[in-house]
Image: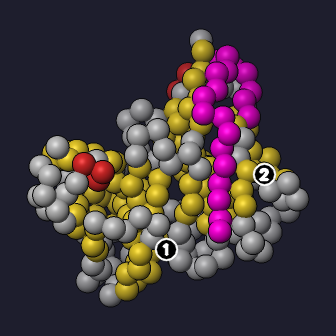
Amino acid sequence: AQKITQTQPGMFVQEKEAVTLDCTYDTSDQSYGLFWYKQPSSGEMIFLIYQGSYDEQNATEGRYSLNFQKARKSANLVISASQLGDSAMYFCAMRGASNTGKLIFGQGTTLQVKP
Amino acid sequence: NAGVTQTPKFRILKIGQSMTLQCAQDMNHNYMYWYRQDPGMGLKLIYYSVGAGITDKGEVPNGYNVSRSTTEDFPLRLELAAPSQTSVYFCASSYSGTGGHGNTIYFGEGSWLTVV
């Protein structure tokens, strides 16, 4: 069975500092994809970054980067230069090889950025 | 661009009532999904569809039904509402079922449902 684990229920970071949100996953699929979503207090799901299991380089999107360690089955999100607007819930999710596109989500990490 | 549109945004139901959450996408996506999110939790898949006329159960399908008569629409039916169905419901769509680069999964804004 596939599983996503986010072990940090809540995190604090000082504005302008970097923060790492942890995500570990479990799957027997060889081909899979890992996603990070941001959910602000307004509730919508905002796509941040994607990493494919065969991608050789870590994904980056602006201030977001994904620290992908395949052997350890971890896909941590790094946010550089935190901003107040980064305060939100963050979800790690995985899509397996089934071709159905189903996502398995972790329980999320609440990030608060302090001024 | 409208993207994925869900209606209604908020609804209060009495126990035992039924209702339909509407979902429509205008991106010609083949794959559509319904997720629910309980307070402080991640999203769980209720039902999904890989094309018109094809639907399948996800992780938590009990108490729900879906249909997919067109590519654009994927309504979720709640029969005999129960307090356990109080949740936020998200509809999502994607062009295909694999990959991620250029195959973003688009989410609707969510529908807040309370069963009392």
Residue carrying label 2: A74
- Chain containing mark 1: B
SS at badge 2 = strand
Which subunit holds the residue at mark 2?
Answer: A
For the point 32% across and 48% down, the residue is B87
**Location of residue B30 (image quadrant):** bottom left
Name the spot of residue A86 as percent of width and height, x first. Answer: 57, 30
Q: In the image, A63: left or right of A104?
A: right
- Look at the numbered disc 1 and give the secondary structure of its residue: loop
Residue nearest the observer in this picture, B104 or A71: A71
Where residue A75 is drawn, which disc sits there?
Answer: none
Which span of residues is magenta-colored?
Answer: A1-20
What residue do we see at 37% from left, 68% from top? Answer: B61
B3 within the magenta span: no
Label 2: how many Cα within 10 Å (few below 14, some 14–19, many 20+): some
**Which residue reaches farthest top?**
A115
Residue A79 left/right relative to A106:
right
Which label sits on residue B95? 1
Residue B32 position within the rendered picture, expressed as x and y whole percent measured from the top left: 41, 71
Q: Position of residue B95 (x, y in %)?
A: 49, 74
Residue B92 placement (x, y as % from top left): 41, 62
Type of amino acid under label 2: Ser
